[in-house]
Image (cartoon, rainbow, N blue to C red):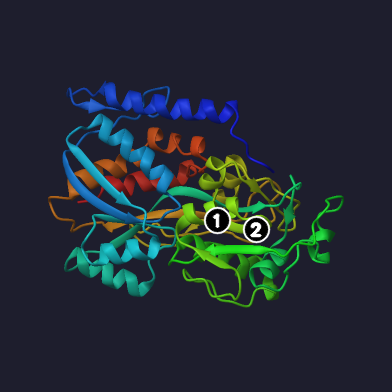
């Protein structure tokens, strides 16, 4: 599937611009600036002034840029500085009390929870709040190939450096009628600590069985391939390198007009789009306790039409214990991102809005931040 910049994407860009314009000129019942992210104007930004820093996930970079622009346009007295430095770096910044919240494509580990909670103060807890549904695209650069199917076993072989030629029989068998070159496969992975890598390797660990012998991790462990820092650099590397393949958050593949493989987990090839990604995320279950909304994703789903390689980006912050200089603006911003208006911008950019039942829980948790 080749994603092209066509009229529909131009219209999508115009729709996002329209949302930002609404954000800049709306007002709420108290006379403060407000914004609507939907045609019904049902979700408004409740402004708070001040300045906060946040950092982390590059997968949510495009969503965060749109959200921050909308919020700051509506609220001239607010400054939100989000640095897309990678999930691992974002968590460390939060632990070190540099930021008000961290973005991570993987929930805190038990050890990280202990460290992050210590930053929140005695008796307080750091929590994982799901916010962005992000399908992981298997993007490729292969001249003359407009449709490519992958299975978890073949992906495991490619990224473990065991399948090294594009015309390997394992690839040819699942792509009948496709003329595959004898060229060497150039695979790209993240060079930095990455929640996208963690989710992609969780997928391979779960769905590929014995074909993938490496543990999931934020740090790439398999041999071979080339590393690139951040989702944007992985996407750029694939685009500029013939005969290449890599994993990248779908928003970057969409904006870059990249070719994206279909994925067959056993229920038939699934084309990646917002609807198929949402179907893949819909099977997630909450495994966190209390106000923590850590999710378990079903990477092995064989449900027809459900895209299996998905991630959810969490905003990690203190449920209680943020400094008074950070709490009002952090709460107001996360209230906006979890609103109908905020979530409504995601599909336009190639993300997947969270399922209604889950976003209701997210809104309740955000409302309780204190």
Whether residue 338 can be seen here: no
Q: Secondary structure at mark 2?
A: strand
Residue positioned most to the left: 324
> Residue 109 falls in which quadrant of the image?
bottom left
In terms of sequence position, does the residue under pointer 1 or pointer 2 come before the other?
1
Q: Secondary structure at mark 1?
A: helix
Image location (x, y in percent) of residue 58: 42, 54
Tell me: residue 299, above or below residue 81. below
Give me the residue at 30% from left, 49% from top: 82
Image location (x, y in percent) of residue 279: 60, 46
The answer to the question of whether label 1 and label 2 lie on touching residues, with beta carbons closer than 8 A, is yes
Give me the residue at 27% from left, 45% from top: 367
Within 10 Å of the Cα at label 1, are there few (<14), some (14-19), or many (20+) other Cα atoms? many
Image location (x, y in percent) of residue 30: 17, 24
Image location (x, y in percent) of residue 67: 35, 39
Q: Which residue is mark 2?
A: 244
Tell me: residue 149, above or below residue 96. above
Say which mark, if any, is on residue 126: none
In the displayed structure image, the side of residue 114 where residue 153 appears, left or right: right
**CA–CA distance between discs 1 and 2?**
8 Å
Viewer-closest of 221 and 132: 221
Whether residue 253 can be seen here: yes
Viewer-closest of 125 and 191: 191
Quarter of the picture containing the N terminus is top right
> Residue 7 falls in which quadrant of the image?
top right
Give me the residue at 24% from left, 33% from top: 46
Viewer-closest of 195 and 37: 195
Q: Which residue is mark 1?
A: 237
Viewer-closest of 301 and 170: 170
């Amino acid at each position: 599937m080749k994603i092209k910049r066509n009229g529909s994407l131009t219209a999508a860009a115009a729709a996002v611009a329209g949302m930002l314009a609404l954000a800049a000129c709306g007002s709420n019942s108290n006379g403060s600036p407000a914004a609507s992210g939907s045609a019904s104007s049902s979700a408004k930004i409740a402004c708070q002034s001040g300045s906060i820093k946040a950092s982390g996930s590059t997968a949510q970079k495009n969503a965060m840029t749109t959200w921050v622009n909308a919020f700051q346009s509506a609220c001239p007295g607010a400054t939100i500085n989000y640095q897309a430095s990678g999930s691992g770096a974002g968590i460390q910044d939060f632990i070190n009390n540099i930021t008000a919240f961290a973005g991570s494509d993987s929930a805190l580990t038990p050890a990280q929870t202990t460290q992050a909670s210590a930053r929140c103060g005695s008796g307080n807890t750091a929590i994982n709040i799901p916010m962005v549904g992000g399908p992981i695209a298997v993007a490729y650069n292969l001249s003359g190939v407009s449709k490519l199917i992958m299975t978890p076993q073949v992906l495991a072989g490619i990224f473990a450096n065991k399948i090294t030629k594009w015309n390997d029989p394992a690839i040819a068998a699942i792509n009948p009628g496709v003329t595959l070159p004898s060229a060497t496969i150039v695979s790209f992975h993240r060079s930095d600590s990455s929640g996208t890598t963690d989710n992609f390797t969780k997928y391979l660990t779960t769905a590929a069985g014995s074909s993938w012998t490496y543990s999931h991790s934020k740090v790439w462990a398999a041999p071979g391939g080339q590393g690139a820092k951040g989702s944007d650099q992985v996407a750029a590397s694939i685009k500029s390198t013939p005969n290449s393949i890599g994993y990248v958050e779908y928003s970057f593949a969409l904006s870059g007009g990249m070719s994206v493989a279909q994925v067959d987990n056993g229920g038939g090839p699934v084309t990646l789009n917002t609807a198929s990604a949402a179907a893949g995320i819909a099977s997630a279950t909450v495994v966190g306790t209390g106000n923590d909304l850590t999710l378990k994703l079903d990477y092995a789903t064989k449900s027809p039409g459900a895209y299996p390689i998905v991630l959810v980006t969490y905003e990690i912050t203190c449920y209680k214990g943020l400094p008074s200089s950070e709490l009002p603006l952090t709460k107001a911003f996360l209230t906006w991102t979890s609103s109908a208006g905020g979530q409504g911008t995601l599909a336009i950019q190639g993300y997947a809005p969270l399922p209604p039942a889950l976003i209701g829980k997210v809104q309740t948790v955000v409302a309780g931040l204190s």
